[in-house]
Amino acid sequence: MVFLHQIFFSYTTAVMLLGTSLTQAFSPNLPNSRFESKLYSLSAELEHAREVFSRWDSDGSGSISSSELGDMLRMLDINATEEEASALFKFLDSEGSGEIQFEQFLPWYSEATEASREMSSTIQSVLTGRRTVGEFDQTPVQDDVLKRAVECAIAAPNRRMSEPWRFIKVGPTTVKKFAELNRKINLDMETDEKEYKALDWTTIPGWCVVTSKLTPDDENVELEDFKSTCCAIQNFMLSMWSEGIGTKWTSGPVQKTPEFAELCGVDTSKEKVVGCIWYGFATGGLVNADPRRRKKGVDDVLSSLP
């Protein structure tokens, strides 16, 4: 969803700031217009705009009225208030006819799609740029950053609307108990007398345990819920990354023990621990995060059927 105020100031403000240059920038009738070629070769977005415009042009006149513009914008995923839609219509209807044609709407919408594409590029950069962080500085992350991450997490796809997830912020006292449990389990697993050495869990500044609901009588529902929880974890980590916070999703043997569940207050008859998310400021900055890339590219994994 693109908000109109992100791509259009308002007619009055824009004219005050830019004067006649605004009209020149958006006019489709000017010779040498930079939009002239777009009138003949439209992108998929602009072809879709033509389709939606035609849908509102119910009488086939080739134009729409002011009252129809706001609804049409919403169908194009542009969220505009009545005032913003009215200001845009006034700007586009330079002749004051009370109607606008697609050729008048197209140049502005072309600019809007470019602005939207820039925002999309930013989002895609977060998606493709996120990396696992293994070393953290000691500065704690503020709770409002955590809350925004959880807000993003619970917006994850959840077809059954079961909301199977739970997020548990873990403080230093409990982390010390985790660390002691981890040390004990790993020492028990040792087959020689070498001193066990591992990352000191108490140095990790942020911990969030994530659980997913169990449905013992329906494994398909439980699997669907597990998938949704995994999507939620991805959203959580992406939100953190977008705010300059590194994360690592861990799911070692300690987390599968009843002792760990008890420390977290997890009723293992109703939910299971999906993993722990460690989070904090990355030592050396996010630029030094794990640089590993996928071995396969788009062409390796994308196929088409007739």
Image (cartoon, helix red, strand yellow):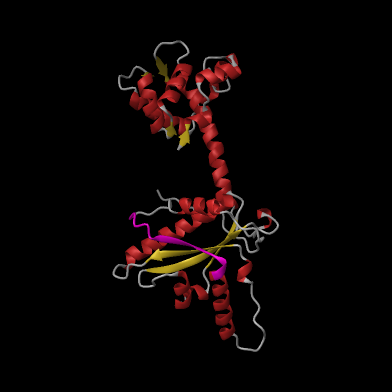
Across and down, in percent, residue 40 comes to 49, 24
Residue at the spot 51% in from the left edge and 69% down from the top edge: 251
In this orientation, which residue lies closer to the viewer: 114 or 37? Answer: 114
Residue at the spot 46% in from the left edge and 21% down from the top edge: 88
Q: Quadrant of residue 294?
A: bottom right
Residue situated furthest left in the rendering: 217
Q: Quadrant of residue 292?
A: bottom right
Q: Report the quarter where the N terminus lies.
A: top left
Q: Give the magenta-colored segment's residue range.
A: 160-173
Q: Is residue 292 placed above or below 216 in the rendered structure?
A: above
Across and down, in percent, residue 204 comes to 61, 65
Across and down, in percent, residue 52 comes to 38, 29
Can you see residue 26? no
Across and down, in percent, residue 302 comes to 49, 53
Q: Is residue 272 magenta?
A: no
In this orientation, which residue lies closer to the viewer: 125 or 237? Answer: 237
